[in-house]
Amino acid sequence: MTLQRPRRGNGGFVLACLLPALILFAVFMVLPTINVFRMSFYAWSGFSPDPRFVGLDNFTRLLDDDNVIRAFQNTVTLLVVVTIVTMSAGLFLAAIMTRQRLRGRNLLRFVLYIPNVLSVVVIAAIFSAVYDQENGLLNGVLRVIGPDTWQQVWLGDQKIVLYSVAIAMVWQSLGYYMVLYMSSMASIPEELYEATALDGASATRQFFDLTLPLIWQNLRTTLTFFIMSAVNLSFVLVRAMTGGGPDGSSEVLLSYMYKQAYTNSSYGYGMAIGVVIFAFSFLVSLLVSRATRREPLQF
Amino acid sequence: MKRPLVLAGAAITALALLAGCGGTDASDGKTTLSVAALEGGYGRDMYTQVIDAYKKSHPGVEVTLQISKSIEDEISPNMKAGRFPDVVVLGQGREAALTETLIKDRALEDLTPLLTTTVDGKPLGEKLTDGIVGNLNTNPYGDDKTFLMPMYYAPTGLFYNKGLLAAKGWTVPATWDEMFALGDKAKAEGIALFTYPTAGYLDSFFFALLADVGGESFYTDVMTYREGVWQTAQARQALDITTRLLSYAAPTTVGYANQQDFTKNQQSILDNKALFMPNGTWIVGEMADAPRADGFAWALTPLPAVTAGGNRYITTSVESVWIPGAAKNKDAAREFVAYLYSDEAAKIFAGSNAIQPLTGIAETLPAEQAEFYQVYTEPGVAALVGGFAGTPPVEGVDIKKTLFDTANSIISGDKTEDQWQAALHEASEKLRQAA
């Protein structure tokens, strides 16, 4: 009797404490997500009281829509480019900052982290100044150091506009991942480095054979972040910087979904694109997680 | 004892969190009319003044005003939940396309009876300027039913610096041949013939050009997606002229044709780097604080004629007022909309440069505005109102984007005129089938 009652009491208390959060989670996360899936089977403008059930029509239309295919390609390109560049640059900088005892590294870390706290509108304004084709920072530097052919219309050339967006994404997120990697590298005991140095390992060898395996779990986690941010951040940056243009060449899946749902009065079709994004992100995260699974190393 | 307290506490917390989501309705016996308006270049004061004046003459009605530069974002969530404003002042052609969406949904109230309502002793229909009602802008389904009332109107066309033309001794081209000849002359002096802020601004250009090329009937055919209309010789001619004009575009145009940088394209007119750009009368206020070349003065011209002496059209941008079909106080809303066209209200609106399409209003305009409205009196020039006809939504098809945005790809050489024409044909056919 004395053993049972407090336990039941505890259960009720825990439930009561969780209840507000659970309700909020259900109302603002679970229900809307279910709604996205449900609405993808309807043709609905967003306002009329009578959505029309169309089954899988929205999804079959997706396959014929060249714009979806282009937006999908752009999303994947950004995902791959931004992940590879940010991850390798983040790791490189973190390794230098933790291992090399650079002078002024706190200042450097601060400077690299700043873009992460800036709002996207500010970033778009900064890059509008950097990419300006006439008196922008980038073309200004290229004018000084190289021939005229090096200068580009960064946001107007359909072949490079996506990479211009990618650079802004890398710039925005590099500091954040660098700090993440630095914190896990800092927790690796110094003795391990001393021991390997005595065995004659170079700094490069130490990085690949000691640092990387020991922060592997951290790397796996950040890979999932990369997938999320490539999908989400690309939308806000594309919207603020190019609006998907010129002529749709920098459109990503989320920005196309937004346009269809809110400006082309095809809410159901937009939600179908949303379902594709959901499935895609989920699948890629799962695959990446499976592919990078290793026995965790302890120190 | 404690457990019920804890549970009650948790329940209250949860309820308090959700309570913020609810709204309240005041009811004190008066009709409460909710008005939503876009805060455009004319500002918000004129609306509060008109509403104050209305409340004085209609003591039984309480009017609430919701006004914002992004009014769609503010009223859409409530509309999705079934709470519609009674009167909305918002035109077509906005990026959020709320008006277009409700047109496609057939969710607007029929306002045809309003035209026979007496305002200041005259039927409202007679107070309005000829031709402003009965086009696709007011009767979006192409029949004789009016769903959107024209609120303010302004001419759009090619804006240029008349100071520069006078200084160089150039005349405003009257035909496209003259236009391209001027383009070559200007090129020799390092000035581009043409630019646009973003490709979306080509709407005023294209609508006028289509009517110039094939007359108003052809224009209506294009706007109502007549079968094979984009494969006709007239359509090809319009695309030919445009493609040739785009070859004269300022090299910076595409790079700046986005939300962030479009004012830099507008600035190139002020800096005498480009000659003409499609725009509306709001450009004067929008660029009022921008630096400009010596002797700069804004001027507006219709598009050059296709043949010497041919008809020229001025695309007229018309803001609209409409009543959602799901509005609660439709009668009070109709009465309020009729009041917006009274002499009393028109005077308040004109004070903020918002010019309503009422007969005789042109004589009362201030000099700066009057000059722009002069284009309507030029010989052979006619007003053109409207836009693409409303159809049920077609997933993935946006003919405006296909028509305007492709200009970016034509300039950069990523698409050819043939591809443009084929894409337009495909989009138009899909919309026709949906209609």
Image: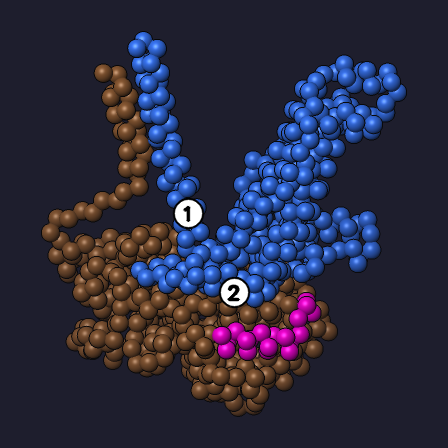
Chain colours: A blue, B brown
Q: Quadrant of residue B323?
A: bottom left
- The magenta span reads B412-430
Residue at which label 1 appears: A34
Residue under the image location 24 percent in, 57 percent down: B51
Residue at which label 2 appears: A61
- Magenta region includes residue B420: yes
- Magenta region includes residue A173: no
- Specify the amino acid type for callout 1: Ile
Residue under the image location 70 percent in, 73 percent down: B187
Give residue A266's position: percent from left, percent from top. Answer: 44, 62
Check residue A141 in the rendering and tell me which mark sits there, or answer none. none
Horizontal side of residue A134 vs B326, given as left or right: right
Q: Residue furthest left?
A: B29
Residue under the image location 81 percent in, 15 percent down: A195
Give residue A211's position: percent from left, percent from top. Answer: 74, 26
The chain that hosts pointer 1 is: A
Q: Are marks 2 and 1 on the same chain?
A: yes
Horizontal side of residue A101 vs B224, given as left or right: right
Q: Is residue B13 above or below residue A286?
A: above
The chain that hosts pointer 2 is: A
Q: Quadrant of residue A43?
A: bottom left
From where the camera sits, is residue B379 visible?
A: no
How many numbered markers are drawn? Answer: 2
